[in-house]
Each structure stands twice: as C-alpha cells, then as structure tokens.
Amino acid sequence: EVQLVESGGGLVQPGGSLRLSCAASGFTFSSDWMSWVRQAPGKGLEWVANIRQDGSEKYYVDSVKGRFTVSRDNANNSLYLQMTSLRAEDTAVYYCARLKVAGYPYCYFDLWGRGTLVTVSS
Amino acid sequence: QSVLTQPPSVSGAPGQRVTISCTGSSSNIGADYDVHWYQQLPGTAPKLLIYGNTYRPSGVPDRFSGSKSGTSASLAITGLQAEDEADYYCQSYDSSLSVLFGGGTKLTVL
C-alpha cells in the first residue's frame, strides 16, 4: 500500500525543539521530491518545506527559515523535519506529502499522510 | 490573509452546480504557474482533486473540473452530492519562491 505515516508530534514549550519523522512505503521514495505542509487548528493549509530527491535542494516558507531543517534518509525511506526555537504560532498538524514535480517549481502534492499534531505551549 | 484568495464559503443543493474561485496575481497564477485543487473532508488529510489546472487524478469523478484564465482559476462541481461537503483549497507557486495555498473554501450541501 502506498502511504506516508508521520510521527514525533507532541507538546513542547516555546523555544523548544522537536523532530518529526515520516515513513514512506509502497513507492520508490528516492525518486520523489518530498514536502511538509502544516495546518493550524481551524485554519487553512500552509506549505512549510520541500526537499529534492537527493537532498541537494531545499526550500522553506519564510516564517521557518533558520529554525526548521528538512532532511531525508533514502536508505530508510524516511523524511524528517527538525524544528527549533518553536513558537506558539507553529502549533499545527504537520503533514508529510509527496511532491510531484514537472520541472520545479511546477509541482503539486499527490500523496498525503494523516498528519501529526505539534502543540507549542507553556 | 492568503495571497491566493478564495471565498470563505459556498453552498448548493444536491444536484446543483457550484464553482469556487481562486484569485491570484501576476507573480503567481498570472505568471503561468499551474493551479491545483485539494479536497479536505472533515477530520481527514487533504486529497488531490485537480492538478495542472484541468487534470483529474485517477478515481476523481468527472463531476469535478478545473479551469484557469489570467490571474484566476476555478473549481466547478456539478451534480452536487452530500459527500462533497468539505473544505477546498487551491494551490500554486509564487515568484517569491513560495508554494502557495488559498485560504480555503467551505462547501455546504444544503
């Protein structure tokens, strides 16, 4: 079965760190760009980060630049999001998504995980 | 305030046709970047509905269609069904190097 499964969410204090993971299965993970997209409670979708197949290109939304780092381990079919200096406004469900690219940046998200909730609060 | 503007809500009776607009600018939709659409049923992850402005992934009913013109795009749903009640999001790219989502539209089936 083709799927993405996120893990690592939880409650963290402001200024803290958290590492999210995404396990991919059912497709050739190393052949695809991957992404993180988040959704604050009751709000819309917000793109967070993209990473190329070999990790050589990474792109971030301005609000997380310098604080979040996307990475991947193709040998273990895994995507990661290292989050530091967390703020209350980072509270959201974080989705792992496969990014279909027809020549970057012509891209869309064709496969989504169920998400993992990150809550930043004291 | 999203760069891609969608109406907060639309509604229609079963069997009717509804459209959802997505308005951008010359730095995103108007710059010839494609528009894609997602459906998010209550309590679930988003699902790709339309890609490349007009294409439907396998398994998406042909009641759903997309179009694009100038700096705007639209999603049309014909033969409205109760199961279509969901949030709908458009997505594109901006010359500022950002992937963009619209603010989302809640569809209510009356």
Image (cartoon, rainbow, N blue to C red):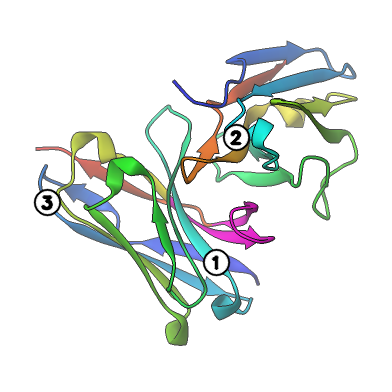
- Residue B110 visible in image: no
What amino acid type should be assigned to the residue bearing mark 2? Asn
What amino acid type should be assigned to the residue bearing mark 3? Gly
Q: Mark 2 sits on what residue? A: B28
Magenta residue check for A101: yes
Q: Is A63 situated left or right of B83 in this image?
A: left
Dot 3, how many residues are within 10 Å of its Cα: few (below 14), some (14-19), or many (20+)? some
Dominant SS of magenta comes to strand
Q: Mark 3 sits on what residue? A: A16
Q: Is A12 situated left or right of B55 in this image?
A: left
| Badge nearest the viewer, 3 or 1 | 1
Q: Is A2 situated left or right of A46 in this image?
A: right
**Chain letter of disc 3 in the image:** A
The tag on residue A33 is: 1
Magenta residue check for A92: no
**x 43%, y 28%: residue:** A43
Residue A23: x %, y % from top left: 46, 71
Mark 3 / mark 1, whichever is N-terminal: 3
Q: Is B56 situated left or right of A93 in this image?
A: right
Please determine if labels 1 and 2 lie on a single subunit. no
Query: What segment carries the magenta color?
Result: A95-112
Residue A20: x %, y % from top left: 32, 61
Against A33, residue A65 (above or below) is: above
**Chain letter of disc 1 in the image:** A
Element on which disc 3 rests: loop
Residue B90: x %, y % from top left: 63, 34
**x 19%, y 41%: residue:** A120
